[in-house]
Image (cartoon, rainbow, N blue to C red):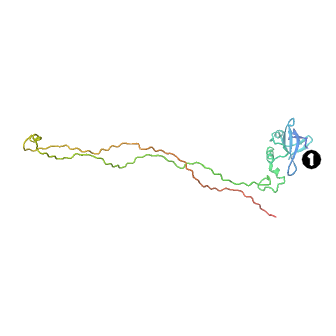
């Protein structure tokens, strides 16, 4: 399409694929790199209405106006882009997606230096990325502790004082005080006298005495750990002859 011819479309009617009127072409937007017509700003609705961008790649002039291969409803549902004199790359991508057009094919004709050999040409640059290591912590179970009580036996020795009775023979002379007891009975005879002896013996008695209370608790200890991991990064180099 000749630029001078297309710019004359201003003020003409824009028609959909069925020939129905969409709106009036208010402005023609040119590609900033090639100066080729790329977008038509169309006023849809009464009293000026809102401006809608429509691509001119497949537009054809007719006696009734300029016809594009899109339905009227599809054009009216186009993203609302502010007509400030120039479209940004992100705005163009949004519009191209709406009209199911390949943005990469459009950009390949804009004077980019070289072309992509690994896929569709998008622009004249490539993005270099690097992996970054993000380190955090995750809690996991390292073990369990429990209290268990069991019985052990010990030998305990203690000294206990005990008493016992022993026989002691006491002799006393005959006196006026005991003469009667001494002469009571035969003058000569055999006689036995019995004395009961007593002795103390150790007696052991055991009873349980509470000694202490024992419980489990936890303390958090912080320490430094060194971690390492392999990360990848992209490098860009130039192959070919340099003159």
Residue 110: percent from the left, percent from the top?
84, 52
Residue 230: percent from the left, percent from the top?
65, 56
Secondary structure type for disc 1:
helix
Residue 102 can be seen, yes or no: no
In depth, the one of 91 and 240 nearer the eye is 91
Residue 128: percent from the left, percent from the top?
74, 55
Give the residue number, with chain letter if any, for mark 1: 5
Q: Residue furthest front?
A: 176
Residue at image location 82% in from the left, 51% down from the top: 107
Q: Quadrant of residue 44 in the image? A: top right
> In this image, 227 relative to 218: left or right?
right
Q: Quadrant of residue 68 in the image? A: top right
In depth, the one of 107 and 152 nearer the eye is 152
Q: Residue furthest left?
A: 187
Residue 45: percent from the left, percent from the top?
85, 36
> In this image, 221 relative to 101: left or right?
left
Quadrant showing the C terminus: bottom right
Q: How many marks?
A: 1
Q: Residue furthest top?
A: 46
Q: Quadrant of residue 48 in the image? A: top right
> In this image, 151 relative to 72: left or right?
left
Residue 107 can be seen, yes or no: yes
Q: Crowding at label 1, few (<14), some or many (≥20) Cα neighbours within 10 Å? A: few
């Amino acid at each position: 399409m000749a630029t001078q011819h297309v710019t004359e479309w201003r003020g003409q009617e824009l028609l959909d694929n069925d020939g129905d009127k969409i709106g009036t072409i208010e402005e023609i937007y040119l590609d900033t790199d090639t100066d080729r017509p790329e977008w038509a700003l169309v006023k849809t609705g009464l009293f000026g209405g809102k401006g809608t961008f429509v691509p001119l790649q497949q537009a054809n002039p007719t006696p009734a106006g300029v016809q594009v291969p899109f339905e009227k409803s599809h054009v009216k549902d186009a993203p609302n882009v502010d007509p400030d004199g120039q479209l940004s790359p992100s705005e163009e991508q949004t519009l191209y997606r709406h009209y199911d057009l390949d943005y990469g094919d459009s950009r390949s004709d804009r004077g980019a230096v070289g072309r992509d050999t690994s896929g569709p040409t998008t622009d004249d640059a490539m993005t270099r990325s690097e992996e970054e290591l993000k380190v955090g912590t995750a809690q996991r179970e390292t073990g369990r502790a429990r209290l268990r009580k069991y019985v052990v036996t010990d030998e305990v020795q203690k000294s206990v004082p005990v008493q016992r009775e022993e026989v002691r023979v006491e002799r006393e002379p005959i006196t006026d005080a005991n003469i009667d007891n001494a002469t009571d009975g035969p003058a000569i005879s055999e006689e036995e006298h019995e004395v009961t002896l007593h002795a103390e013996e150790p007696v052991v008695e055991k009873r349980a005495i509470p000694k202490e209370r024992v419980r489990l608790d936890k303390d958090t200890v912080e320490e430094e750990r060194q971690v390492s991991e392999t990360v990848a990064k992209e490098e860009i180099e130039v192959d070919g002859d340099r003159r």
